[in-house]
């Protein structure tokens, strides 16, 4: 059988095979996971509008982040790629972007589309943001509403979904925005629009979210005041080029973490992982369930702390996931559901309605997939009750959601039979080479025609 990563390359344009996943060996090894997707997106964006030349190392070579780099090429920014994981960005300054000749394709990336809507809302030219079928169904009013309050001219489809048509506005005004949702993407879109708005722009949130945009704006020379649940800056500042080292993506590390936790006799080391406290709620949730995860060699960087994670097998028990952890692990819930399916007792998740507007409705997608493998799940409006027990083999559909596909690949390591995982195309958006690296750790994971 051919390795699936060979067919992920976008230029080939070939259909991607399904996965067959099955229990294999203990999970053992020492690895690095791909660069952080959130940081990679933001590094390209901020370096492009900075004065001078920036170097980005550790850049995620995924389809989403490459799409962002292509978009800035369309906007007149010269970006060199001297080697995998490295980008040299010749910034054009805060007012140097150029009108694109065609629509700007964000692919599968909600991060790119929402952040770009804020950045492009203040430009002197018109632009259109489009995406793939999945992205075209995702809600955008959460960013277009506050941007319109600033004076932006943005049109969406009637139901508030893409494409986004952005017309040049005479000027934007800073606002004091109380976001009704805890979303780093909403916060970031407003702050990026605020860079070219008159006066102060501030955002407050119902719960603190990840602060990559704030940290990176400061690293690029912006005077920004921020803390848990708030951020504010004054428009008219210019960004200065800088060097960015992208840490390993914790959301990617989540999959081998849970695999090593679930499979007996496993012992795994993951090096150079970003551990921003607004991203690592999964570690705390898994520890409450009984997981053995040690955080070692912690050091600081401009995008947050970086550490080595040491994981070994441990039996898990069901818990009520604390509501305070939910915003800090929203991307990791699919793999938490997988862990819960193998835990003793009931794991209850509430306050996670945001999962319904991700690349798929992740609550329903995981619930249906788990039921197909014999796991009892009671779905609620904002979460689910997962009753741990015996996991059977079977057939699941990832619905084109990369995190759903990888979560079931992990869960299959504890299944009583093989699990066929369909529609894995978008795994390349965040974790290129996932199946090859997981096989190297001992997981049973193969591609089939």
Image (tube, grey):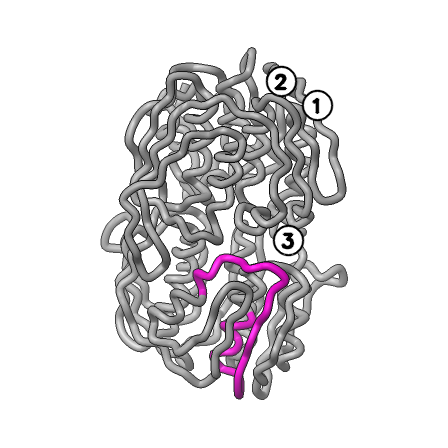
10 Å neighbourhood of mark 3: few (<14), some, or many (≥20)? Answer: many
Q: Are the residues tagged 3 and 1 within 8 Å (C-beta)?
A: no
Q: Nearer the viewer, residue 411 or 402?
A: 411
Answer yes or no: is residue 446 visible: no
Query: Where is residue 184 drawn, in percent x and y?
Result: 54, 60
Q: Are the residues tagged 3 and 2 within 8 Å (C-beta)?
A: no
10 Å neighbourhood of mark 2: few (<14), some, or many (≥20)? Answer: some
Answer yes or no: is residue 129 visible: yes
Magenta span includes 114: no
Mark before the other along the chain sequence, 3 or 1: 3
Q: Is residue 274 left or right of residue 363?
A: left
Q: What residue is at 68 percent from the left and 43 percent from the top?
A: 350
Q: Which residues are magenta?
A: 190-213
In the picture, the quarter occupied by the N terminus is top left
State the CA–CA distance, disc 2 to disc 1: 8 Å
Q: Nearer the viewer, residue 141 or 311?
A: 311
10 Å neighbourhood of mark 1: few (<14), some, or many (≥20)? Answer: many
State the mark number for residue 332.
Answer: none
The residue identified by callout 3 is: 136
The residue identified by callout 2 is: 389
Q: Quadrant of residue 71?
A: bottom left
At numbered mark 3, what does the secondary structure look like: helix, strand or loop?
Answer: helix
């Amino acid at each position: 059988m051919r390795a699936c990563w060979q067919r992920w390359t976008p230029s080939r344009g070939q259909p991607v095979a399904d996965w067959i996943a099955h229990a294999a060996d203990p999970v053992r090894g020492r690895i690095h996971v791909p660069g952080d997707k959130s940081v990679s997106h933001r590094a390209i964006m901020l370096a492009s509008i900075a004065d001078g030349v920036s170097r980005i190392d550790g850049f995620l070579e995924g389809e989403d982040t490459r799409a962002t780099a292509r978009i800035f090429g369309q906007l007149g920014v010269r970006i060199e790629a001297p080697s995998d994981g490295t980008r040299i960005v010749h910034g054009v300054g805060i007012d140097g972007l150029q009108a694109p000749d065609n629509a700007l394709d964000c692919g599968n990336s909600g991060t790119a589309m929402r952040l770009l809507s804020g950045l492009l809302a203040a430009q002197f030219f018109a632009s259109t943001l489009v995406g793939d079928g999945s992205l075209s169904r995702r809600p955008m009013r959460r960013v277009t509403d506050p941007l319109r309050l600033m004076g932006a001219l943005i049109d969406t489809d009637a139901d508030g979904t893409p494409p986004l048509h952005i017309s040049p506005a005479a000027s934007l005004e800073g606002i004091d925005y109380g976001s009704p949702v805890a979303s780093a993407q909403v916060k970031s879109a407003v702050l990026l629009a605020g860079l070219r708005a008159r006066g102060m722009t501030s955002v407050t949130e119902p719960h603190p979210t990840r602060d990559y945009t704030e940290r990176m704006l400061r690293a690029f020379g912006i005077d920004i005041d921020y803390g848990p649940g708030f951020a504010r800056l004054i428009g008219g500042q210019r960004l200065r080029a800088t060097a960015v080292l992208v840490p390993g993506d914790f959301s990617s590390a989540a999959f081998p973490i849970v695999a090593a936790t679930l499979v007996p006799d496993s012992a795994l080391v993951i090096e150079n992982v970003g551990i921003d406290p607004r991203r690592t709620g999964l570690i705390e949730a898994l520890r409450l369930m009984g997981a053995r995860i040690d955080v070692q060699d912690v050091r600081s960087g401009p995008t947050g702390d970086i550490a080595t994670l040491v994981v070994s097998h441990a039996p898990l028990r069901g818990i009520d996931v604390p509501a305070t952890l939910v915003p800090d692990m929203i991307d990791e819930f699919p793999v938490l559901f997988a862990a819960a399916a193998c835990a003793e007792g009931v794991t209850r998740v509430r306050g996670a309605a945001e999962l319904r507007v991700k690349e798929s409705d992740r609550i329903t997608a995981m619930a249906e997939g788990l039921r197909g493998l014999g796991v009892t799940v009671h779905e609620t409006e904002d979460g689910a009750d997962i009753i741990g027990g015996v996991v059977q083999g079977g057939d699941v559909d990832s619905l084109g959601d990369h995190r759903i596909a990888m979560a079931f690949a992990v869960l299959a390591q504890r299944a009583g039979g093989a699990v066929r995982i369909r529609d894995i195309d978008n795994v390349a958006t965040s974790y290129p080479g996932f199946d090859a690296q997981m096989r190297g750790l001992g997981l049973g994971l193969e591609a089939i025609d």
